[in-house]
Amino acid sequence: MIRNRKFPRFNRSLVTGWFPLSGETAAVIIQAQKISELSGGAFDISVGPLVDLWGFGPLPKGERLPTEEQIEQALAQVGYRHVSVRRQPPAVKKDIARLRIDLSAVAKGYAVDALAELLEQQDFDSYLVEVGGELKAAGQRMDGRPWRIAVEKPVADSREVETIFLLTDVALATSGNYRNFYLEDGQRYAHTIDPVSGRPIRHRLASATVLDPNCARADALATALMVMGEEKARAFCERNRIAAYLLIHDNESTLAYMSPVFKHYIEKERQ
């Protein structure tokens, strides 16, 4: 599992040389960097300064919205291309002294993968592992039926089921912007921050669910799709053969989109 005790020291440090860390953490960063490259920076583990600036970090939200100057200052501390990582010996470094890393958008998926691998090493061929909403299913339930996985309706004030999928031998991760947000002068500010613009996303995509053999990859991809918005996300999934299920706000209703790969997988499970 990830041993992150050194991470606060890395994030506080202004040194730009190699910083040793566990092999597991290096593997997670490598996975994250691959999704950052694939998504053109929509996924970025260095986005923390912007998250804090907009009031979604550990500190209370400021009384006023960030200024253009503050956004530019935060953007100067962000950028996945300023992070380097190696496997042997495992280490990470940054070329911006105040850059810091936050693995929260991929670590839960990695934990699911690690637990699933542990179960398989113990010869379990049927299981359902879930960590913080990300999960991986294998085999069947005890009654011989496929695992039934629900996706929530993208509404803030209740917990209702949007749809149920029958799944096996795959990981699933969902990201959404319909719970963690605030209103300021009638404008809604969601917790998902675009690492390129430096601002909260402002599009109709409410949630993104991704299927993939690897849960860490699904976890990161779901976040990347949320940053992209519905049109770019659809094109990205079709171009890169990503199995995704998108829920899109449409006035008072919700539209659903299944990428071709997601639709093929669901139809295969129904046979």
Image (cartoon, rainbow, N blue to C red):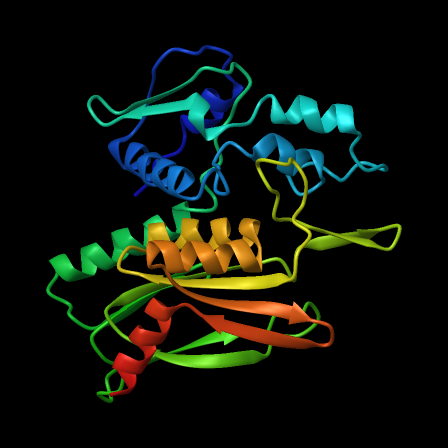
Horizontal and vertical percent position of residue 131: 40, 59
Q: Position of residue 207 (x, y in %)?
A: 55, 63
Whether residue 76 sits left or right of residue 23 in the image: it is right
Q: Residue furthest right?
A: 185
- Frontmost residue, 189 versus 268: 268
Q: Position of residue 48 (x, y in %)?
A: 57, 34
> Residue 245's x, y, as percent?
46, 68
Position of residue 84 relative to residue 157, above or below, is above
Q: Nearer the viewer, residue 93 or 233?
A: 233
Q: Residue at x 19, y 23 (%)?
A: 88
Q: Quadrant of the C terminus?
A: bottom left
Task: Identify which residue is drawn at 76% across, 23% down.
Answer: 69
Q: Residue 247 lies in what quarter of the image?
A: bottom right
**For this rendering, which residue is in front, 172 or 62?**
172
**Is residue 258 shown above or below 12?**
below
Q: Is residue 141 left or right of residue 246?
A: left
Task: Give the residue displayed 27% in from the left and 81% down from the top.
Answer: 269
Q: How many marks?
A: 0
**Quadrant in which the N terminus appears:** top left
Residue 43, placed above or below residue 176: above
Residue at 15% x, 68% y is 124
